[in-house]
Image: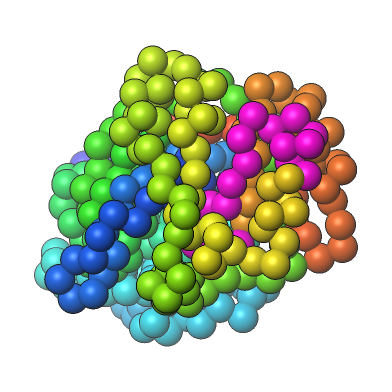
Amino acid sequence: MAAPLQSVSVLAPAKLNLSLDVVGILPGGYHALDMVMQAVNLYEQVTLRRSEDLVLRVPGTRIPTGPKNTAYKAALAFFHYTGLLAGADITIRKTVPVRAGMAGGSADAAAVLVGLNALYGAHLSMTELCALGASVGADVPFALMGGTCRVQGLGDLIKALPPCPDCWFTVVMPGYGISTPAAFAAYDEIGSPTHPDCAAQEEAIRAGDLGGICDAAGNALEVCAGGADTASLKEALTDHGARAALMTGSGAAVFGIFDAEETARQAAAALEAPGRQVYVLRPDRGGARVVKVTR
């Protein structure tokens, strides 16, 4: 019989919204969304070790590590659901910018669920993990699934799609973030002239049509909730060859979709500036996954 695992390391990809629409209000005042989400090769790195206590560390950041942290909530949800009388020592190495609309916190929570499932041999199914994730945060189920998905409702209705056609993303994070609650409050006050056709984008993905994906791209939160630089960053990305440019999630990161790596990297070099974080990324076909175990 194999010795029990003592630690696991998990990678969890960030995401971009190829489209985001607000389609209604659900009971409880939550916004009903229709989105196409794409995992990208920028990863949160999470290490989990067996422990009697639940300890969360996020070195090099000021991110709270207590019960309000999404990753901490995910661990509590896992132990409550499984009934395991155990804990974990969790260390998160942040690489995804905070308040960017790239689901870094959700990726952390997904990594914790996947990691604890492996660490303690709980054998929870993806369906069970996604249900736990949905109780923690709207983007957590997608962070578990990864790849390319149509996501609706509160983020809990997920349809896996074929892989996104080969392309490159240049992502620009300005020197500030945007609060998700503030973004939706702005939408409620102002509304939006933008309502992307997510169904058309899904069909374009199924057809492997990058042009169709770009034509249908859009974000209903962009005009009302975007940052001071959102419009100018979009314009700059388009000027440097992006086939489409838009804000991801509730912001503040903005990205362009490119056919070729060289063009994407040229755009990234042109948009570098003090205080900004600029990334050149590719689609990732997976979600949070274990990459190393120690017995």
Q: Quadrant of residue 97?
A: bottom right
Q: Is residue 157 left or right of 286 when viewed as pictured?
A: left
Residue 30 position within the rendered picture, expressed as x and y whole percent measured from the top left: 26, 70
At x 68%, y 55%, the residue is 231
At x 31%, y 33%, the residue is 199
Q: Is residue 211 left or right of 289 when viewed as pictured?
A: right
Residue closer to the observer: 3 or 269: 269
| Quadrant including the N terminus | top left
Residue closer to the observer: 71 or 140: 140
Residue 166 visible here = yes
Residue closer to the observer: 29 or 175: 29
Q: Is residue 210 left or right of 198 when viewed as pictured?
A: right
Residue 15 position within the rendered picture, expressed as x and y whole percent measured from the top left: 49, 47
> Measured along the vertical axis of the image, is residue 164 above or below residue 280?
above
Residue closer to the observer: 221 or 158: 221
Residue 241 counted in the magenta span: yes
Residue 290 visible here = no
> Measured along the vertical axis of the image, is residue 52 above or below residue 139?
below
Q: How many marks?
A: 0
At x 63%, y 41%, the residue is 245
At x 78%, y 36%, the residue is 239
Q: Quadrant of residue 106?
A: bottom left
Residue 171 counted in the magenta span: no
Magenta part of the protein: which range?
A: 236-252
Q: How is the image coloured?
A: rainbow
Residue 196 position within the rendered picture, expressed as x and y whole percent measured from the top left: 42, 42
Residue 149 position within the rendered picture, expressed as x and y whole percent measured from the top left: 34, 37
> Measured along the vertical axis of the image, is residue 152 above or below residue 190?
above
